[in-house]
Image: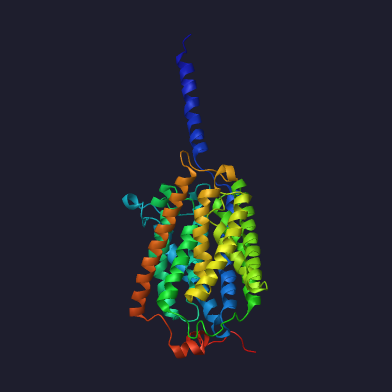
């Protein structure tokens, strides 16, 4: 049976009319639920830095330096926000063409080509850029804890700016921006390498380059306001749900499991640190339990979207135990003056979490499984590669930056200024007028 000319024309017109509909079905459409969750997550992660981290760090330093720490966190937030929009976002998440394995391009500088209707997957790219901005803000802010109470404000600002551009942005691109580590298969859901190993190693280098605070370790330097620290810690815990679960970039089952394991990791890390301290020193401390929480959260971060409750429990307990030992070893044995324990908590935690991701992502242990053809052993080796590369890049470049800035501006305040306190010397203010 053959079709007449009129029949063929009719069928052809139907096919032509249907083809735009087929194309429209394939084009990503805005998902309002995912967008709402990422908007919320962006606020939660910003909440981690200001006020969360600022209060957490502010309470840990001495009274004469509390404003300096709050100022540093606030200033970093403002500066990174501007630089991110100018060109850092483009370098981290843009297409670098032939060099894309190493760095993005400048096509999205000043948010060029990103409008109200521009999508990144099924969410507005403006929201994605804002979410990633909050990660870029908190990472250099974490490093502040290593050199608290002794670095010049001008040196801190220049260091944070340069560190963002030549350390954070490249590592971010390698792991999350379709760079070479991502293509290699490194599993880092929310920042084990990009944030915690990166900041932790930079903190260790900064502490060593600047040297100890006057009087350390002979003079006791207790936190001036633990109440402030606990409030900041609670804000960090709440904000971390946006940090980890928001990294699913969707309001789905992955985000739900990520939120659950994040909470388990925090709770397990807290209790483990508390009991370690109880056994070692005879009494559990408030400072110990909140530090254990941060260790648990930092350690579960890279694994959070890949593991189940069992993995989270083991990772949290391991974090509390190992980070407790590392902190005491650095302070009491090595006598390294990492003022607020950034490396033994974030650096060591990030290393442990990234490594254990390669173990507990296995489906037999409740995880999501590995890529096709990848064994646990191969994934662990890939994770080790990511850790080593990030640590080496962060450590070497941080050292070079600090030495350059020391020549240009000088890194430390004078002994007299350190004795008087940075609040008065650098900002002509005091934290308390009682």
Where's residue 6, x and y in %? 47, 17
Where's residue 112, x and y in %? 41, 57
The residue positioned 48% from the left and 36% from the top of the image is: 23
Given residues 21 and 190, the one toward you in this image is 190
The residue positioned 63% from the left and 63% from the top of the image is: 272
Q: Residue furthest top?
A: 1
Residue 99 drawn above or below residue 59: above
* Residue 87 appearing in the image: no
Residue 182 drawn above or below residue 395: above
Q: Tell me the quarter of the picture where residue 113 sits.
A: bottom left
* Residue 25 appearing in the image: yes
Horizontal relation, residue 257 to residue 119: left or right? right
The residue positioned 45% from the left and 15% from the top of the image is: 5
Given residues 247 and 85, the one toward you in this image is 247
Where's residue 391, x and y in %? 42, 62
Where's residue 53, x and y in %? 57, 70
Residue 48 drawn above or below residue 361: below
Q: Tell me the quarter of the picture where residue 281 sits.
A: bottom right
The residue positioned 48% from the left and 31% from the top of the image is: 19
Residue 28 drawn above or below residue 68: above
Circle count: 0
């Amino acid at each position: 049976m053959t079709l007449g000319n009129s029949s063929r024309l009719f069928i052809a017109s139907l096919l032509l009319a249907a083809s735009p509909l087929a194309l429209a079905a394939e084009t990503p459409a805005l998902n309002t639920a995912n967008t709402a969750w990422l908007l919320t997550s962006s606020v939660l992660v910003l909440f981690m830095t200001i006020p969360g981290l600022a209060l957490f760090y502010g309470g840990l330093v001495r009274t004469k330096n509390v404003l300096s720490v709050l100022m540093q966190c606030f200033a970093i937030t403002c500066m990174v926000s501007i630089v991110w929009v100018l060109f850092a976002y483009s370098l981290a998440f843009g297409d670098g063409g032939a060099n894309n394995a190493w760095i993005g391009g400048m096509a999205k500088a000043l948010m060029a080509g990103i409008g109200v209707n521009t999508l990144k997957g099924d969410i507005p790219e403006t929201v994605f850029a804002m979410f990633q901005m909050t990660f870029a803000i908190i990472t250099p802010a974490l490093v502040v804890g290593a050199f608290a109470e002794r670095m010049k404000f001008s040196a801190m600002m220049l260091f944070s700016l340069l560190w963002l551009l030549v350390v954070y942005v490249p590592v971010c691109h390698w792991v999350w921006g379709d760079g070479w580590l991502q293509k290699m298969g490194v599993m880092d859901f929310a920042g084990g390498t990009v944030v915690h190993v990166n900041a932790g190693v930079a903190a260790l280098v900064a502490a060593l380059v600047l040297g100890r605070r006057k009087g350390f370790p002979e003079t006791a330097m207790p936190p001036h306001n633990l109440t402030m620290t606990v409030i900041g810690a609670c804000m960090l815990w709440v904000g971390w749900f946006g940090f980890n679960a928001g990294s699913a970039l969707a309001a789905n089952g992955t985000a739900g499991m990520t939120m659950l394991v994040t909470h388990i990791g925090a709770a397990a890390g807290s209790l483990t640190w508390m009991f370690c301290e109880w056994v070692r020193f005879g009494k559990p401390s408030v400072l110990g339990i909140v530090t254990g929480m941060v260790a648990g959260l930092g350690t579960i971060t890279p694994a959070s979207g890949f593991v189940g409750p069992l993995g989270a429990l083991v990772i949290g307990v391991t974090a509390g135990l190992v980070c407790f030992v590392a902190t005491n070893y650095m302070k009491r044995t090595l006598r390294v003056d990492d003022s607020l324990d950034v490396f033994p908590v974030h650096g060591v935690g990030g290393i442990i979490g990234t490594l254990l991701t390669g173990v507990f992502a296995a489906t037999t242990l409740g995880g999501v499984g590995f890529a096709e053809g990848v064994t646990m052993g191969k994934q662990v080796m890939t994770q080790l590669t990511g850790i080593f590369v990030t640590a080496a890049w962060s450590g070497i470049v941080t050292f070079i930056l600090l030495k350059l800035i020391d020549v240009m501006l000088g890194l430390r305040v004078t002994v007299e200024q350190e004795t008087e306190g940075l609040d008065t010397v650098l900002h002509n203010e005091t934290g308390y007028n009682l």
